[in-house]
Structures are given as C-alpha cells and as structure tokens.
Amino acid sequence: MNILVTGGAGYIGSHTVLELINAGHRPVIVDNFSNSSKGVIDRLNEITSSEIKYYEQDFQDQAAVKQIIETEKIEGVIHFAAFKAVAESVADPLRYYQNNTAGFANLVRTVLDANVQTIIFSSTAAVYGNPPEDLVTEDTPCRPESPYGWSKLMDEIILRDTCAATPTLHGTALRYFNVVGSHDSGRIGESPKTKPQNLLPIIVQAVNGTIPPLTVMGTDYPTPDGTCLRDYIHVVDLAKAHIAALEHAASQSNGAFEVYNIGTGKPTSVLELIKTFETVNDVAVPHTLGERRPGDPVACYASAEKAEKELGWKAEKTIEDACRDAWRWQTQNPDGY
C-alpha cells in the first residue's frame, strides 16, 4: 500500500516509516521539519537501501496535501504531525487547538475529498488524565488534564463521528503510553529541537552532561520503591502497532472507528528505570531525590489485551532493550542529526 505519513521525519514517525518498508508498504512522508531534521530522511534511506519520497510541506495545507495524495496514489494515512508538550500546551493552548485539532479536522476533510478510506491516528494515554484505576483499559473514562490531552481527545471524537457518518471510512486511534528507545542500528532515534519532556531522554541527557542531574519527583508513593509506576513502550514495538492497525483496517469490508491502548501492561518505577539504565549501559545516572510533583498519578499502565486480540499485536521488547538502544543512539549521535 502507498501510505502518507504526516510527521514522518519525527521520532515515532521515522520508526514507523522504517517498519512500513519492512512490511512491504511504500511510505510517502509529509513533514515541515519544524521539530525534526531532514537528516532523518538520509538515515532512513541508508538503513533501507531505498529512496523514500518526501515532501517538505505543512499537513494543514489542504490543497497541497490533496495534490500529494493524488500524485502518489495514496491508499491510507498515518497521522503523526502534532505538538506534544504538555506544559507548552498549558502556556499556549490556542497553538495546540489550532494545529492539533483544527489541523486534524482539515486533514480528515482532505483525505475524504481524495477518496482515501483509512486513517491511523496518533493519540495518547494523556486522554485519560489521572485515571481512577492503575490498569487503564480503552473503557477507562477520558478526563484530560491539559490542552494537549484535550486536543488529542477532540481528534478522536472528530474521527469517530466522521466514521459514523461515512460508512466506508476506517479510523483507528492508537493511545500510546510512555514511548522510549530507538532503532537498534543507532541510526535513528529521538532528537527533539526542544527540551526533553520524558524520563528516559532526560536520563540520557543527564548522563551525557547535556542537562543537570535529574530530580526524582517523589519517593513516598505507595509503590515497592516509593516512586511512580509507568508503562514504557519501545518505539519499535509502537511502530509495528501502526502496521498491524493499518493492515487490520485494510482487511475489513466495512468502515468503523476503533481505539487501542498501545503499551506493555508492565509497570516500571522511576528508580527501576534509572537502575536498569545504569546496569545495561554500565554508567551512573546523576540524580537527586525530590518532593512529589502535583498531579502525578501514583501508577498508570496499559491493558493492551484488545490490541493483541484484534490486531494480533503485542509488545516484544523489554525495558532493558529500550535503555540500551537509547544510550546507543545518544553515544553514536551526541549532537542528534
């Protein structure tokens, strides 16, 4: 299948492009490179020994995207292009609603106008907010606590309602938990142009000396070691989930909207992640112990049973793999791309 990948030069997008090629599909990247690098394209071409088609284009330009869809004979769309920093969304909510929500609505319209019937949407566990139970299923109530989370939930609603009104449209939302790691070649990985927001990239940069020692936010939670528990999903496993969702949608005779949690179902504590990183990479992680951060859930991890049952997908890589791959990427690419 010819697949349009918006934000395909980003962290998750680039790994998904690689897995699309491995699965025999032909990805076409649309990216404005606002938070990614053109160097990603060269690395992908190197790994796959191919020449991946890409367009330097904002996904919100409806006329341009429709032309690309028609020119490249696109059969499905995987949408990654979105802003994703929670704190930034609180400071500038309109930017997030304009890009993530209004932009997505325009993209869905463009896709339908071009007679494409499959959309795989990059959602997030942030739609759940602070869930009432540690183990989160797709039926857990959605109560986002940031404009970022709300923008993603609104996108899900847009896709759900459009599928209900368009019987031939296949829409799938994948709710990611904490994405970590990189490709084991060390040639592509996470290289944001802004300050890292998530724990493993912070660990990596703290070890590298790029940023000060990290602070563990709270050590008195009711968990085995007193620190918060989270679900860390390796980016390669996550990329493969998109392929599974795409191929499942293509196999269905009628359109529908589905939501899937993408995680391991295995909680890992903050201190456990730090210790694992130290062990597998034989380095010390500089860190201090601090007070709790307001609003942090004690524990949050995915039930991914629905994805395994319906998509035939489940996580295969371990937290050790993620720590090893993240450090390999950093040491081989200290300045990113």
Image (cartoon, rainbow, N blue to C red):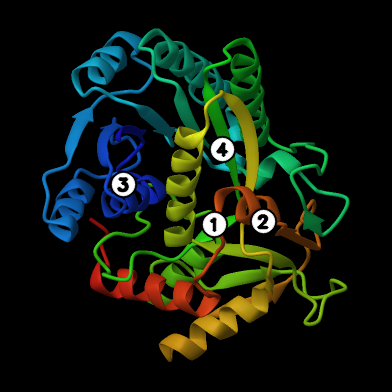
Give the left or right position of residue 57, taking residue 106 as reference: left
Marks 1 and 4, how far apart at CA: 33 Å
Give, as a three-letter code, the residue at label 3.
Val
Q: List x then y, in percent, for residue 107.
A: 44, 18
Residue 17 numbered tag? 3
Closer to viewer: mark 2 or mark 1: 1
Mark 4 is surrounded, within 10 Å at the Cα level, by few (under 14), some (14 to 19) or many (20 or more) other residues, namely: some
State the SS at label 3: helix
Q: List x then y, in percent, for residue 127.
A: 70, 39
Residue on which the image places disc 4: 88
Image quarter for residue 215?
bottom right
Does residue 280 lie above or below 216 as drawn?
below
Closer to viewer: mark 1 or mark 4: 1
Marks 2 and 1, how far apart at CA: 9 Å
Give the left or right position of residue 227, taking residue 200 as reference: right
Residue on which the image places disc 2: 304
Residue 285 visible, this orientation: no
Closer to viewer: mark 2 or mark 3: 2
Give, as a three-letter code, the residue at label 1.
Trp
Image marks 1 and 3: residues in contact by CB distance under 8 Å: no
Give the left or right position of residue 156, taking residue 212 as reference: right
Image quarter for residue 143?
top right
Q: Residue at x 64, y 23 (%)?
A: 160
2 or 4: tag closer to the N-terminus: 4
4 or 3: tag closer to the N-terminus: 3
Give, as a three-letter code, the residue at label 4.
Glu
Residue on which the image places disc 1: 313
Marks 4 and 3, how far apart at CA: 27 Å
Q: List x then y, in percent, for residue 304.
A: 67, 56
Image marks 2 and 3: residues in contact by CB distance under 8 Å: no
